Image: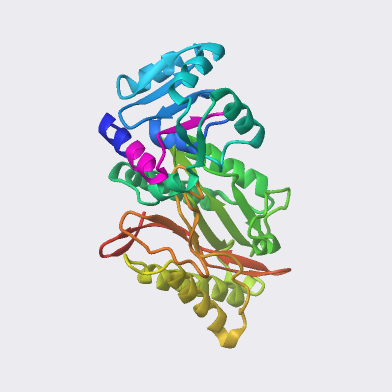
Amino acid sequence: MDSKAIKDRATRVLDAAKVDRILLANTNSEDPNFVYITDLIGGLFEGNFLLIKKDSITLFTSPLEYELAREQLGTRIGIVNLDSQKKVEMLVKEIKGRSVGINGNFLPYNSYMRIRKRMKMRKVVDASTAFEKAREVKGILEISRIRKANRITKLAIADVQKRLKVGMTEKEAAMMFENRILELGADGTSFDSIVCFGRNAALPHHSPDSTKLRYGDMVLMDVGVRISNYCSDVTRTMIFGNDKKRIRDYERKQRIIDIVREAQAAAIAAIKPGILGEKPHMIAQSIIDNADNGRYKGTFMHALGHSIGIEVHDGSGRFLSPGSKLMLREGMVSSVEPGIYIPGFGGARIEDDVVVTRNGAIIL
């Protein structure tokens, strides 16, 4: 990302927050907005600060991270290499008596109180909403990274599905996926992998365990990868086995998958600029609730989709959900993931990430 793109992002947030300065403070982990502004890939940057002003952006780092920051950023933003005490003293000079925006969604209360006391700010504003709005619409570079993450995710899922064997555990399948994505060039997973065999497919957020795969099981994989800070989130459901006659309740299992696939296709077809986020959800909900004379009504129990970006639930999070009055715009990226979940039996979810274009949604 070039210096102009960095400055444009920072200026949008600064203007939206209506403050003199924005201060992003990393703790023992990175603030996602720190990553959004700097585009730094790799490194810990613990205890680092990013100061955003109208005419400059400055990273206050330590000797531990200085060379890495300089290597990645060059002259695109200012980089100050200071120990902790000098870092604070310099920041106080920049911030004292100013109105300052912070990311209230990230900064722990105790850290905030320490910073506020030491920095002597005149006014503190929660700038988290300004960042959320800025991150709702993705640029060309962001979309290309999400597209690459999706491509690797789908390739890895297909590879795992081909290698499934009776007796394999959910944990083993998850590990197989996670090893394969590294071979394909991913930086890592974007969230803890979900792999469900049989009845566990009825649990939307099931964690892989020692459950063993049986012939005829429904297999649900909800997984994602990270590429250069950007995430994917993809779900596939299949029936394990080729001999329909040997699979118990095959017709019902396949019907559940087909209904979910129909609901997803209809929802994606409805996505376009200018509609409210609740509309695609209600379309998918209606198809599931009315299928087979209402047999599966109430089995779709979560929002249709959430935004995707630096975080797997990015920016303002739930885009396509009941009651969402968010107006969809070109460049927004969201998951689309209807599901049917039947306790004691199993379930199905199919999920793809889509980008909103002037002509509708495109699957990434």
Q: How many badges with numbers are in the image?
A: 0
Question: In the current view of this chain or complex, which residue is farthest to the bottom?
Answer: 293
Picture quadrant of residue 69: top left
Which quadrant is the N terminus positioned in? top left
As rendered, which of 284 and 200 lies closer to the eye? Answer: 284
What residue is shown at x 30% (from left), y 58% (from top)?
A: 330
Any part of residue 16 in sight: yes
Q: Is residue 327 left or right of residue 102?
A: left
| Residue 15 is one of the magenta-drawn residues | yes
Whether residue 105 is situated above or below residue 257 in the rendered picture: above
- Residue 29: where, in percent of width, then height? 57, 30
> Toward which corner of the image does residue 111 lie, by quadrant?
top right
Residue in view at x 33 percent, y 66 percent: 272
Left or right of 170, for residue 61: left
- Of residues 139 and 148, which is closer to you in this image? 139
Residue 239 included in the magenta stretch of the image: no
Of 67 and 165, the residue lying toward us: 67
Q: Position of residue 280 (x, y in %)?
A: 44, 70
Q: Quadrant of the C terminus?
A: bottom left
Write the start and end of the magenta stretch as one range. 9-27
112 w.r.t. 61: above or below: below
Instruction: Choose top left, top right, bottom left or bottom right for residue 80.
Output: top left
Residue 185 makes an appearance in the image: no
